[in-house]
Amino acid sequence: MSERSIPAETAVILAPAFKALGDPVRLRLMSMIASAPGGEICVCDLTPAFDLSGPTISHHLKTLREAGLVTAERRRTWVYYRARPGIVRQLATLLSIEPSTDV
């Protein structure tokens, strides 16, 4: 077994996040949220980037929330989204590849 393999408990936690990111719309939404200036973005700035209805975008955002990838905060009529740095860091660490000494 590799030193880099993840424990079963971690796999259970991260699997829903990877499943949620398996959709191109959700992957784009996550990218937009994670790279937003100031660390957050309003749903009003996300929706126009897609040729989809508001309810469809809301469904995708709900999936990202349920997977633990983002948090949401309602401010008056708008909802603002932030990436959850802990899980994003875990995903990035899992996906990073260290150079091999085998050539």
Image (tube, grey):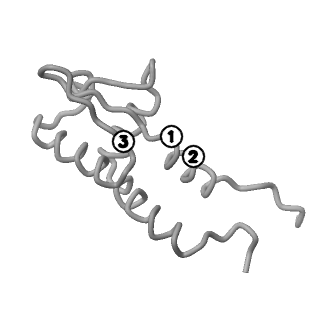
Q: Secondary structure at mark 2?
A: helix
Residue at the location (39% across, 47% down)?
69
In-image side of 20 versus 77 (left or right): right
Tell me which amino acid carries mark 2: Arg
User: On residue 70, which mark appears?
Assistant: 3
Residue extending farthest bottom: 1
Please report contact status of discs 2 and 1: CB closer than 8 Å, yes or no.
yes
Tell me which amino acid carries mark 3: Val
Q: Earlier in the sequence, mark 3 or mark 1?
A: 3
**Residue underneath mark 1:** 85
The quadrant in which the N terminus is found is bottom right
Query: Quick one: label 2, few (<14), some, or many (20+) residues within 10 Å?
Result: few
Query: Quick one: label 3, few (<14), some, or many (20+) residues within 10 Å?
Result: many
Residue at the location (47% across, 61% down)?
14
Q: Earlier in the sequence, mark 2 or mark 3?
A: 3
Residue at the location (14% across, 43% down)?
56
Please, is residue 37 above or below residue 83 in the view?
Answer: above
User: On residue 89, which mark appears?
Assistant: 2
Locate residue 12, reporting x and y percent: 45, 70
Locate residue 30, reporting x and y percent: 38, 40
Whole-angstrom CA distance, mark 2 to mark 1, is: 6 Å
In-image side of 86 versus 2 (left or right): left
Locate residue 53, reporting x and y percent: 10, 36
Please report contact status of discs 2 and 3: CB closer than 8 Å, yes or no.
no
Residue at the location (31% across, 48% down)?
64
